[in-house]
Image: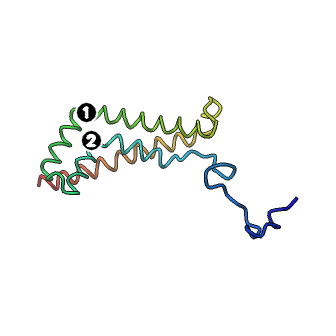
Amino acid sequence: MPTPTDDPLTDGRAVVDVVGGAGASDDLPAFRIGLAGGLVGILCCVGPTVLAAIGVLSATAAYDLSYDLYGNYAWWFRGAGLLVAAGLVWYALRRRDRCTLDGVRSVRRNLVTIAIVGVVTYGFLYWFTTWLGNLAVA
C-alpha cells in the first residue's frame, strides 16, 4: 500500500479536500455568521447609505429613508438579523452532522463569538451611518 510520501503528485505533502470532506474544519464560521447577522440587523440604515453612495438616492433622501426605516421598522430588522444568524448556525451544524444538544454544547464558544461579532458589527455600522447622516444634514 502506498504511503503519502510515495505519491509523486503530492511530494509528501498532505492533501486537503477542497469541498469540505476529510480535511474540512469542524469549527463554525463564527466571524462570518456574526457579520451577516449584524449587517442584516442594521440594513435599515446601511441600505439607504449604500444607495446614496452609488448615486441612486440623494443624501437627504437617504437620510429621510433611513430615519423612517430605523424609527418604524428597526425591531423588524434586528429580528431578521437574529433569524439570519440562527439560521446560519443551524445550517452550519447540520452540515457537520452536529445538530444535537451535545453538538451545540461543543461550539458554545463559537456561539459567544457570533453574538459578540454581531453586536459589534451592528454598533459600528450604526455609529458610521449616523455619522454619515449628520454630515449629510450639516
Q: Is residue 134 above or below residue 71?
A: below
- Residue in the foreground of this view, choosing between 60 and 96: 96
Rounded to the nearest whole Å, what is the CA distance between mark 2 and mark 1? 8 Å
**Mark linked to residue 44:** 2
Q: Mark 2 belongs to which amino acid?
A: Cys
- Residue in the foreground of this view, choosing between 48 and 13: 13
**Mark linked to residue 111:** none
Report the colour scheme.
Answer: rainbow
Q: Mark 1 belongs to which amino acid?
A: Tyr
Q: In the image, what residue occupies the spot 34% across and 46% down?
A: 123
Q: Which of the marked residues, 2 or 1, is nearer the chain's N terminus?
A: 2
Pinpoint residue 52: horizontal percent, then vertical percent.
Answer: 20, 53
Kindly state the secondary structure of the residue where label 2 is placed.
helix
Residue where numbered disc 1 is placed: 73
Q: Please tell me how crowded label 1 is: few (under 14), some (14-19), or many (20+) other residues with Cα within 10 Å.
A: few
Kindly state the secondary structure of the residue where label 1 is placed.
helix
